[in-house]
Image (cartoon, helix red, strand yellow):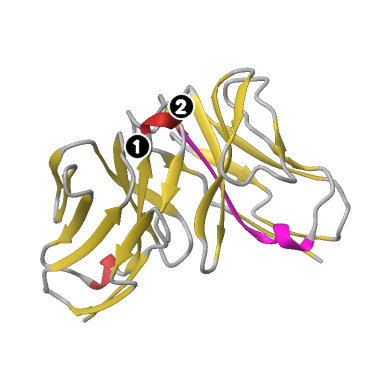
Amino acid sequence: EAQVTQNPRYLITVTGKKLTVTCSQNMNHEYMSWYRQDPGLGLRQIYYSMNVEATDKGDVPEGYKVSRKEKRNFPLILESPSPNQTSLYFCASSPDRPSYNEQFFGPGTRLTVL
Amino acid sequence: KNEVEQSPQNLTAQEGEFITINCSYSVGISALHWLQQHPGGGIVSLFMLSSGKKKHGRLIATINIQEKHSSLHITASHPRDSAVYICAVIKPETSGSRLTFGEGTQLTVNP
């Protein structure tokens, strides 16, 4: 089944404890992206990747890192999480950039930072 | 002011009604997406538009580039259409790579 998977789906952690949210797609998509969703602010783009070893900042990259060592995986790394990173996170992928293609979204990861 | 504005913010309809959700944007765009977020939180892409009109089942999306406006129409609405509908635009200066989202329209369809 063609899908985007994220793990974990739910995570409660404490300030400063490094964490990684994994994202994987099995559709051989070139483009992958991370978004966060907050009440009153909607969805905002964190980072995106056009291809392996090609990543770039979105609108809210501060406090996050990403890597794209393999085409299928695009992990989101929070080196020192803070409470303002409590949010619902979505990974998405598409065959090419979103000006050409619809995006496929993962199920979301709900992160709480205490 | 947000670059992407949706209206209405909340919409309640009776089953069978024709529904329109609007998206206005203040910047030049290369494409526009309509997304549906289910009550459980999952997001599904409905349409990607750069001009004209697209139809899929009971859903129709239109865009008027000159007026910087897009509409999502739902014909013969059903309670299962209850969801948040989100508009997102891609600005050409981002090389088609970055999305800017509206805040969403919460639709409730009552039986």
Q: Which residue does the image show at 16% across and 61% down from the upper left?
A: B74
Q: Secondary structure at mark 2?
A: loop
Q: Chain of mark 2?
A: A
Start-end of magenta stretch:
A83-93
Is the residue marked by circle 2 packed among few (<14), some (14-19), or many (20+) residues within 10 Å? some
Q: Is residue A16 left or right of residue B23?
A: right
Residue A90 magenta: yes
Main SS of the magenta part reads strand
Give residue B19's position: percent from left, percent from top: 16, 68
Residue B39 magenta: no
Nearer the observer, A48 or B90: B90
Q: Secondary structure at mark 1?
A: loop
Give residue A92's position: percent from left, percent from top: 50, 39
**Quadrant of the snapshot with the N terminus of chain B:** bottom left
Q: To which quarter of the image does residue A85 belong? A: bottom right
In the picture of the structure, the residue carrying the numbered disc 2 is: A27
- Above/below status of B87 relative to B49: below
Give residue A48's position: percent from left, percent from top: 56, 33
Residue type, mark 1 in image: Glu
Q: To which quarter of the image does residue A68 belong? A: top right
Residue type, mark 2 in image: Met
Say whether mark 2 and mark 1 are on the same chain.
Answer: yes
Q: Is residue A8 left or right of residue B48?
A: right
In the rendering, which numbered label is found on residue A102?
A: 1
Q: Is residue B36 left or right of residue A12?
A: left
Give residue B37's position: percent from left, percent from top: 40, 59
**Quadrant of the snapshot with the C terminus of chain B:** bottom left
Q: Which residue does the image show at 38% across and 49% down from the upper left?
A: B44
Q: Which residue does the image show at 44% across and 42% down from the upper left?
A: B99
Mark 1–mark 2 CB contact (< 8 Å):
no
Task: Indicate which disc, 1 or 2, sits on the residue closer to the N terminus.
Answer: 2
Nearer the observer, A107 or A53: A53
